[in-house]
Image (cartoon, helix red, strand yellow):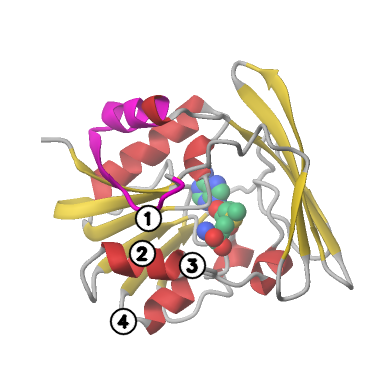
Amino acid sequence: MTVEMREGYEGTGPGAITPDGCAVELYSRLTAGAEPDIIEAAVPAGARILELGSGVGRMTHPLVERGFTVTAVDESAEMLERVRGARTIRSTIEGLDLGEKFDVVMLASFLVHSGDVEVRRGMLRTCAAHVADGGCVLIQREGADYHTKVPRERVDLSGYTVRLVSAEPVGGGVNSVRAEYEFPDATWTQTFLARPLTREQFEEALAEAGLAVTEYLTEDGTWVKAVPSA
Ligand SMILES: C[S@@+](CC[C@H](N)C(=O)[O-])C[C@H]1O[C@@H](n2cnc3c(N)ncnc32)[C@H](O)[C@@H]1O
């Protein structure tokens, strides 16, 4: 598999950078936050989870510890090398065809907001194609003011600052977003293309892929549960 930077995506800082501008060293430092709790509460105990865009396993590891069987997919070999306790598959999400079904398919980290509509369509098709009958798809989408409340920053308790520096329109309903992560000893940046989606646009995109939203799992509407449409 050739790994070229995706157009409009860029990353700076120490260590390997993925085609979408993520830094492997950075993601190795970030903690999982509330996400494993949200996922655990939404799916059956011990479920078989297909995690799309797993990175280094920030969420994979707590899920494995909680008794889930995880298959982690990422296009970056450097990210997957750090995943422990899960089967790993190196592939683009949009090009994945495992010929297997899972109780849960997860598409986190706002990947559904890809600037490229064809990539988004492919990702959602992959979700629909890999979810078992009676299973569900969990998607993490952006909050309502993600692109408008900029610049903004949050100081994490573990001692780093994450800053959303800018979100500049580049045409076609897409923004170029720049994020910075400042640690005492290193700084990483990521620039990426993101397409804001209203709740209606998000639900339409899922419907096009044969998925129907059944529940917004968090008050801010960012974690969503969907199932194959009847
Ligand atoms: C922002 S990181 C988040 C990783 C992980 N979900 C987390 O929360 O720590 C996004 C990850 O998705 C991967 N990725 C992005 N677009 C992808 C695509 N189209 N196909 C496969 N992997 C992709 C990147 O290589 C990166 O590891």
Q: Nearer the viewer, mark 4 or mark 2?
A: 2
What stretch of residues is rendered in magenta? 201-220
Q: Residue at x 65, y 38 (%)?
A: 6
- Residue labelled with disc 2: 39
Vertical relation: 72 (above or below) 199: below
**3D distance between C-alphas at marks 2 and 1:** 9 Å
**Figure quadrant of residue 67:** bottom left
Mark 2 secondary-structure assignment: helix
**229 is within the stretch colored magenta:** no
**Figure quadrant of residue 162:** bottom right
Of pointers 1 and 3, the one earlier in the residue sequence: 3
**Rendered image: mark on residue 67:** 4
Q: Residue at x 32, y 37 (%)?
A: 125
Of pointers 1 and 4, the one earlier in the residue sequence: 4
Question: Are circles 2 and 1 on residues that touch, CB within 8 Å?
Answer: yes
x and y, in percent, of residue 59 in the image? 48, 69
Residue 2 in the figure: left or right of residue 85: right
**Rendered image: mark on residue 12:** none
Q: Residue at x 34, y 53 (%)?
A: 217
**3D distance between C-alphas at marks 4 and 2:** 12 Å
Vertical relation: 98 (above or below) 177: below
Mark 3 Cα-neighbour bin, 10 Å: few <14, some 14–19, many ≥20: few
Of pointers 4 and 2, the one earlier in the residue sequence: 2
Q: Amino acid at mark 3?
A: Ala
